[in-house]
Image (cartoon, rainbow, N blue to C red):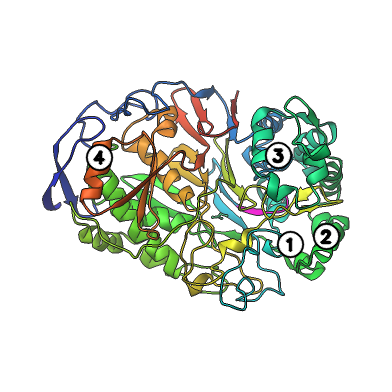
């Protein structure tokens, strides 16, 4: 079974070992070693193989939220409670996910939305699985070079203002998911969101801070008087009532998605576009359709993953990376030089394929079978040198904003839903639809606005993701469902954070199934990221030792430290129920019962 053995010189690392033997194996499963602790009977219940660095801001051993029957985890405690309210009324996980999604549009307008889009990954307890793609599409009047000025330079119009938006998909996606897999009426699942918008909720300091951080963007447009009354951000402790949004949500609850795509909400949206020079028309809205897709089903050391296919790149990129890593058993110690190097080299290859070849399947042929095949991954694994970085051309990346939001739901029957939804940047394009009461996305920036030039995430992408009317822009969203080696639901997870969505989601999964961390530790563990270009490993500051970073540099890697990478919300099955953990780097709530 062993293809070859290589001595990997491990330089000082978190934890232990100076020299380790890393085994390159054929694609067969190799049991993990038990070098520091025996594998616990139930993953996530007890032991960890990894110790965090002293001084890392999230220490180990913090408990997760526990639910005996069910769990909802999102970036808003109120939205998680909305999901649980619907579960307790007898709703299933899809009912609860739709309730949470609409509630996030009210309580987390930073990324929760009806003016954006997303992806929902569903796994029913009876074994059915499905994915719904409600990604925005480019308006019919969009053109390939609409964001390039006369001098050939990219403008900021793909990120700010009326031209930045794709045609929103959220309302169509959520209502369609409910129709096919839900059990309650739209009015029932939307009731908590309508109540939160109509009666208001108390603004907390995190909400005020996130608004204030986007003051320049939001106050350029018509949301300024709602969110910055008298020019100042809503004070913590004040009550935010969103009348326009309450009206929109009530119309959707009563009339379905038509209210948004053909009715009075469409009228407000198009009037708003016309006032500001945007190009979304009534025809664009009426044409919008969500697409049911078959999730990518892959395996990693006997675990089964259901991930999102294109128009998201998340599933393919995660699968390709995990398939490469599967060739190395056990993985090097968590946080060690060799661990960061191996993940980097795997990410580099998977992101190179992602950035160069993937796009909307309605427009291009994605080489899915090749990219997710074990044999292709084996050939990539064989290229990785144990002590030398491979190279890709460098350029300056922009600052990584956080944005998007992921929520995970499990119900008492074991139905599971992983959903990621986004406006792209925080508060999207900044454009707020008067009369509609919601922010519009700036998702057009997820296209390669100028193939070969970086977007707001520093991603350099190719022609396959160039702008075309009616096309979905490539996403990194990675709502993921994991089954254990017996085929039983184990994890529901996913993230926000542009391309770091893919790497953070995967690292939380690896922390549980490779390093046997509790879910709380898996979420608190320091993260790293590499996306092929820029050719720089990004690591969370204070999470990796100086010696490890020096060793990586010595191998030829560029390394950049930053505070915080991605925003993950996860659920894990444990003895007697479910652990839920909201992102410790952000806000939110895990609510179980
Ligand atoms: N807007 C971020 C993504 O879809 O990847």
Task: Tell me the number on the disc at residue 444.
Answer: none
Mark sitting earlier along the chain (2/1): 1
Instruction: Give the Cα distance between marks 4 and 2.
Output: 52 Å
Task: Determine contact: label 2, label 1, CB under 8 Å.
Answer: yes
Instruction: Give the Cα distance between marks 3 and 1.
Output: 29 Å
- Which residue is label 1 attached to? 162
Which stretch did the figure color magenta? Answer: 113-118
> Is 505 left or right of 193, judged from the image as shown?
left
- Which residue is label 2 attached to? 272
Question: Within 10 Å of the Cα at label 2, are there few (<14), some (14-19), or many (20+) other Cα atoms?
Answer: many
Instruction: Give the Cα distance between marks 2 and 3.
Output: 27 Å
Is 114 a magenta residue?
A: yes
Mark sitting earlier along the chain (4/3): 3
Question: Within 10 Å of the Cα at label 1, are there few (<14), some (14-19), or many (20+) other Cα atoms?
Answer: many
Mark sitting earlier along the chain (4/1): 1
- Which residue is label 3 attached to? 99
């Amino acid at each position: 079974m062993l293809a070859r053995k290589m001595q990997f010189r491990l330089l000082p690392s978190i934890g232990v070992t100076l020299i380790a033997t890393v085994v390159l194996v054929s694609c067969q499963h190799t049991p993990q070693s038990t070098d520091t602790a025996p594998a616990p009977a139930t993953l996530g219940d007890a032991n960890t193989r990894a110790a965090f660095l002293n001084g890392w801001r999230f220490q180990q051993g913090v408990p997760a939220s526990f639910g005996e029957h069910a769990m909802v985890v999102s970036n808003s405690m109120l939205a998680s409670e909305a999901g649980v309210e619907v579960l307790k009324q007898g709703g299933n996980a899809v009912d609860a996910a739709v309730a949470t999604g609409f509630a996030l549009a009210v309580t987390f307008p930073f990324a929760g939305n009806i003016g954006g889009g997303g992806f929902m990954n569903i796994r029913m307890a009876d074994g059915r699985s499905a994915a719904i793609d409600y990604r925005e599409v480019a308006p019919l009047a969009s053109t390939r070079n609409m964001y390039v000025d006369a001098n050939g330079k990219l403008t900021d119009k793909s990120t700010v203002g009326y031209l930045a938006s794709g045609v929103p998909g959220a309302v169509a996606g959520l209502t369609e998911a409910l129709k096919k897999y839900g059990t309650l009426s739209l009015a029932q699942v939307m009731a908590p969101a309508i109540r939160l918008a109509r009666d208001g909720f108390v603004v907390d300091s995190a909400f005020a801070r996130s608004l204030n951080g986007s003051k320049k963007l939001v106050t350029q447009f018509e949301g300024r008087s709602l969110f910055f009354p008298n020019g100042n951000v809503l004070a913590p402790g004040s009550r935010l009532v969103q009348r326009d949004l309450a009206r929109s949500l009530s119309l959707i609850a009563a009339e379905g998605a038509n209210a948004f795509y053909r009715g009075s909400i469409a009228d407000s949206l198009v009037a708003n576009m016309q006032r500001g020079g945007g190009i979304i028309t009534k025809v664009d809205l009426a044409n919008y359709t969500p697409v049911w897709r078959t999730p990518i089903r892959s395996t990693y050391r006997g675990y089964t993953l259901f991930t999102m296919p294109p128009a998201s790149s998340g599933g393919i990129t995660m699968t390709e990376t995990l398939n490469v890593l599967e060739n190395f058993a056990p993985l090097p110690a968590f946080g060690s030089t060799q661990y960061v190097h191996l993940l980097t080299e795997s990410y580099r290859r998977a992101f190179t394929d992602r950035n160069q070849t993937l796009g909307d399947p309605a427009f291009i042929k994605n080489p899915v079978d090749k990219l997710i095949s074990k044999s292709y991954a084996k050939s990539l694994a064989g290229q990785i040198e144990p002590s030398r970085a491979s190279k890709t051309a460098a350029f300056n990346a922009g600052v990584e904003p956080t944005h998007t939001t992921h929520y995970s739901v499990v119900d008492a029957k074991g139905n599971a839903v992983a959903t990621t939804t986004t406006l792209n940047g925080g508060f999207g394009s900044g454009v707020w639809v008067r009369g509609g009461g919601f922010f519009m996305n700036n998702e057009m920036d997820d296209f390669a606005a100028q193939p070969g030039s970086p977007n707001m995430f520093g991603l350099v992408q190719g022609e396959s993701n160039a702008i075309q009317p009616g096309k979905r822009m490539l996403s990194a969203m990675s709502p993921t469902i994991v089954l254990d080696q017996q085929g039983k639901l184990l994890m529901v997870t996913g993230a926000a954070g542009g391309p770091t969505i893919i790497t953070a989601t995967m690292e939380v999964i690896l922390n549980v199934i490779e390093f046997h961390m509790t879910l709380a530790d898996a979420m608190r563990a320091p993260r790293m990221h590499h996306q092929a270009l820029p050719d720089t490993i990004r690591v969370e500051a204070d999470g990796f030792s100086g010696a490890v970073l020096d060793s990586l540099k010595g191998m030829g890697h560029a390394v950049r430290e930053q505070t915080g990478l991605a925003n993950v919300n996860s659920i894990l099955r444990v003895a007697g129920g479910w652990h839920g953990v909201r992102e410790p780097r952000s806000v939110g709530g895990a609510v179980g019962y």
